[in-house]
């Protein structure tokens, strides 16, 4: 029997859809596109960041890749590797871990670049445009291939590059000036 994929006319239709397979989807032109599993190095970096921010801010304000962001354009949703939410999001996300366009934007989103030119374009260009449009004050792009962290800050509704941080550089964040994080910590290999 041929399985038919649901087609959604609106983001609200998509939000009401439930299946039992525990997969993540991006909503692209009304259709669900399954998100493939991530690389081990990306998950490792994301876990380190989650722990660092949880120790700094508490666990309630730090969300891993399961947080969904509604965005304009295609696809209509994104799943950042790490999102730092506002206090008011905690109650807003109690039933569904989705930040909608009508909600205040999160304070920070972090993406970790997956191998391949298409993925680089997605993180450096497509997501940058969508996150900027959402008014997210800070966006980090972590590039395991180049062992670099690009920090973007929203100024007058446009992302400007605060800097690309490498090696022993300390990451500068206007949202989290108390952060004491060196790039090398994210990429170190432990046995």
Image: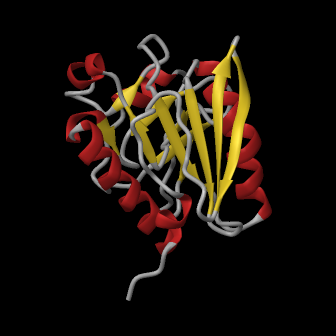
- Percent position (x, y) of residue 141? 62, 48
- Snapshot quadrant of residue 100: top left
Residue positioned 58% across, 18% down in the render: 135
- Snapshot quadrant of residue 67: top left
- Percent position (x, y) of residue 139? 58, 36
Please indicate whether residue 40 sits to the left or right of residue 130 in the image.
Answer: left
Which residue occupies the foreground of this view, 128 or 148? 148
- Percent position (x, y) of residue 87? 27, 20
Image: 1 above or below 67: below
Residue positioned 68% across, 17% down in the render: 155
Residue positioned 20% across, 20% down in the render: 91
Residue positioned 21% across, 39% down in the render: 58
Tell me if residue 35 can be seen: yes
Please indicate whether residue 19 sits to the left or right of residue 107 in the image.
Answer: left
- The quadrant the C terminus occupies is bottom left
Which residue occupies the foreground of this view, 129 or 170? 170
Please indicate whether residue 35 sits to the left or right of residue 115 in the image.
Answer: left
Tell me if residue 37 can be seen: no
Q: Residue furthest bottom?
A: 191
């Amino acid at each position: 029997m041929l399985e038919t994929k649901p087609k959604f006319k609106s983001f609200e239709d998509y939000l009401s859809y439930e299946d039992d397979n525990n997969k993540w989807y991006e909503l692209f032109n009304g259709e669900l596109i399954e998100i493939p599993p991530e690389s081990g190095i990306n998950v490792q970096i994301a876990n380190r960041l989650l722990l660092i921010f949880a120790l700094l801010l508490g666990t309630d304000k730090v969300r891993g890749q399961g947080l969904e962001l509604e965005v304009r354009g295609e696809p209509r949703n994104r799943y950042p590797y790490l999102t730092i939410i506002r206090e008011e999001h905690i109650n807003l996300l109690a039933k569904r871990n989705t930040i909608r366009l009508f909600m205040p934007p999160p304070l920070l989103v972090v993406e970790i670049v997956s191998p391949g030119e298409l993925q680089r374009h997605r993180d450096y260009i497509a997501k940058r445009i969508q996150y900027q449009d959402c008014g997210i004050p800070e966006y980090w792009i972590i590039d395991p291939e180049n062992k670099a962290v690009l920090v973007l800050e929203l100024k007058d509704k446009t992302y400007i590059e605060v800097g690309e941080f490498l090696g022993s550089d300390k990451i500068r964040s206007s949202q989290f000036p108390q952060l004491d994080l060196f790039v090398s910590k994210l990429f170190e290999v432990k046995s």
